[in-house]
Amino acid sequence: MKPFSERVVIFVGAYGSGKTELALNYTLELSKCREKVAIVDLDLVSPYFRSRDIKKRLMARGIEVIAPETEIAVADLPVVTPRIQGALAEPQLQVVIDVGGDPTGATALGRFRDQLISLPHQLLLVINTCRPFTKDVTGIRNMLAAIESSAHLTITGLLANCNLGPETTIEVMMSGLDIVRKAGQECDLPVVGMGVWSELAGQIGTLPVPIWPLDIQLLPPWLSETAT
């Protein structure tokens, strides 16, 4: 997983795409080679997978976590808006933004459009073809258009994260990657990588896109309860 040259990297995607895992893994990797890193939790949609669930772990790595202390709605976004604006304006700070899992969540990102369009940034659409709304090229195109319309920003790349959780196989990932690459061709967008669980990364061989090895950072409540 090679860090982007742009200092602002934004992850968006449908619910169940795994965008928060990718955002967290990217942030942790970035902290190994950049002195000042912050992650912004703009996920106002899903109460189960949130960057702030591991706030202490991130802070221990020297990563600044910009997130409200409690659950908020889009209408309450002014609570964190000043710090987000400050982070975007700080030229030495690498900023990773985890955006809510549907076009409603992307609306929150749109509040920062004026700043973002003046900054070099990556806006990545994370795609899990095992989810119903992004299972084919048509669904991916529709999701992309809806998010762009809500955020008033343009997607710069696609990031494949095709999985069935613990049931994921290499065949599932490769089949999904084919769909994502076709969507990229139709939308004239690069596929910047594919998320692969670390335990499978060594088995998958050479891919036409970079591999993003993922160590699972968050567990849904039902798995967390099982583990404890």
Image: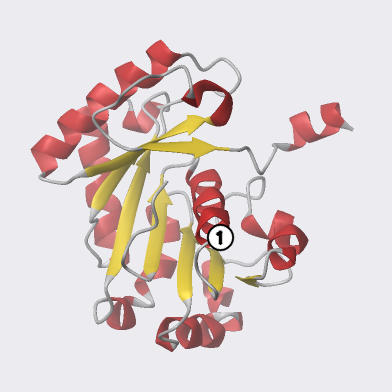
Going by the numbered disc 1, the residue's amino acid type is Lys
Is the residue marked by circle 1 packed among few (<14), some (14-19), or many (20+) residues within 10 Å? few
Identify the residue at horizontal 54%, vertical 68% (top origin). 40
Question: Observer-nearest residue: 1 or 107?
Answer: 1
134 lies above or below 107: above
Residue 16 is at least partly visible in this image: no
Q: Position of residue 152 (x, y in %)?
A: 25, 67
| Residue nearer the viewer, 168 or 208 | 208
Q: Quadrant of residue 170?
A: top left
Residue 181 screen position, x and y as percent = 20, 31
Q: In what element is the residue under mark 1? A: loop
Which percent across, then down, holds residue 142?
Answer: 23, 41
Q: In the figure, is residue 106 to the left or right of 144?
A: right
Residue visible at 33% across and 18% down?
174
Q: Residue at label 1?
A: 32
Q: Position of residue 122 (x, y in %)?
A: 30, 61
Which residue: 55% across, 44% down?
Answer: 21
Looking at the image, residue 87 lies above or below residue 29: below
The image quarter in which residue 222 lies: top right
